[in-house]
Amino acid sequence: MSTDPLFAEFTVKDQTLDNRVGLAPMTRTSATDDGLATDQMAQYYASFARGGFSFLVTEGIHPDTTHSQGYANQPGLATDEQAAAWEPVVEAVHEAGSPIFAQLMHAGAQAQGNRHGYDTVAPSTYRPPGEQSELYGGSGPFPEARSLDSGELNDVREAFVAAAKRAVDAGFDGIEVHAANGYLLHEFVDPLVNDRDDEYGGSPANRARFPAEVTAAINDATPAAFVVGVRTSQAAVVDEERVWPDGETTANALFGALSDAGADYIHVTGGDATAPEVPETDQTLAELAVEYSAETVAVIANGGLGEPPKARTALEDGADLLTLGTSALANHDWPNRVEAGESLADLDPSIVFEPDASLSDAEVPGDD
Ligand SMILES: Cc1cc2nc3c(=O)[nH]c(=O)nc-3n(C[C@H](O)[C@H](O)[C@H](O)COP(=O)(O)O)c2cc1C
């Protein structure tokens, strides 16, 4: 039996994971125009399970047919038809031996390519800096997003819950609430975006309230064995340098509120998961998540962990699990290779990112 900490078993709720290495959520803009998952996506996801990833988190999935869609050809869980389209993906991953969690993402002010034609929304009036992402098929500046009123917050919460129930119906083992990377739920946490004067703005506890409410509502509405995780970050897609100005205070309020909401795991992401990137503390984001969340909450570290020694450091620093993004794209079998002592491939951007982040046939293995 391996003594490598990367290959120790771990349990999340009823899921026994073979090792500590999961697939990070990655948008691939490869669904149909109607947001239906495809056979190509099933092959793509199953290849990571075959390659030894002990759990998979899907790309961000939009939960409603109004404001939430983030990108053209992003898959949805906003309709029963979209849920049904996920079933072959989930089955293929299960056959290959791993659980799969659906990442539910409301794009907020960073939405681009929303085919439903709605305006963009945020906690407060806000225009994201910079230009829309060409990697995901966008161009030009972002429009100014308008602020959501309290009635609309109920609609957003209910849409997340309905999408989570559809994820249950589609056979997913859990969902991940996307509260990171500058999308809507992160915009509530971020004081540079959120200047509300109601109970959802102001103090760190108030700014954590809406993501925690969404998490709690999903937890209440889904079966006991269904995993409910949350992803958080300091940085946004539109601002990779962004941090929580009051660092540890926000970490304390946010991780505490997500624990109280019943999160099974907290997935933290940053540029380097082994570096202290939070102002006014020398702890990593994962260490803060361990410190301020309940003992029952698993902590997943992500960011820059593609070299096995770095990945082991993240576990030694206290994370229970880790996820890989770009290095998984370069090595769909990263865990199997590392366990066998084989070398790892570098990412070929011409296959994965050119002309955009959509799946290329060269990247998706067929049936074995
Ligand atoms: C092509 C691509 C798409 C991504 N899409 C998402 C997404 O849908 N949801 C999300 O939370 N993070 C997304 N991310 C961020 C990754 O999950 C991860 O945090 C990032 O790549 C850093 O991890 P790494 O250093 O292992 O690559 C994406 C990253 C890439 C490269």
Image: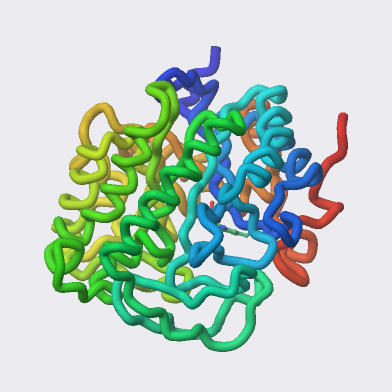
Image quadrant holding the C terminus, namely: top right
**Residue 196, x across and y down, in percent:** 20, 73
Towards the viewer: 211 or 252? 211
Residue 311 seen in render = no
What colour scheme has been applied to the protein in the rendered image?
Answer: rainbow
Q: Quadrant of residue 243?
A: bottom left
Q: In the depicted view, which residue is nearer to us: 149 or 70?
A: 149
Residue 2, position in %: x, y? Answer: 54, 17
Q: Position of residue 288 (x, y in %)?
A: 23, 47
- Left or right side of 260 for 149: right
Q: Is residue 126 visible?
A: yes
> Where's the N terminus, which quadrant?
top right
Left or right: residue 91 compared with residue 122: right
Residue at coordinates 16% horizontally, 59% vertically from top-left?
206
* Residue 172 percent location from the top left of the image: 56, 32
How many callouts does the rendering have? 0
Q: Is residue 122 above or below residue 40?
A: below
Image quadrant, ligand 1: bottom right
| Residue displayed at 62% across by 50% down | 327
Q: Examine the rendered structure and indicate whether residue 89 appears above or below residue 248.
A: above
Report the residue at 79% width, 60% height from top: 351
Residue with the most extreme bottom position: 140
Q: Is residue 142 left or right of residue 157?
A: right
Viewer-proximal residue, 363 or 114? 114
Q: Is residue 85 above or below residue 246?
A: above
Q: Identify the residue at horizontal 27%, vertical 48% (top origin).
A: 212
Outermost residue, top direction?
1
Q: Identify the image quadrant of residue 235.
A: bottom left
Which is more toward the observer, 33 or 25? 33
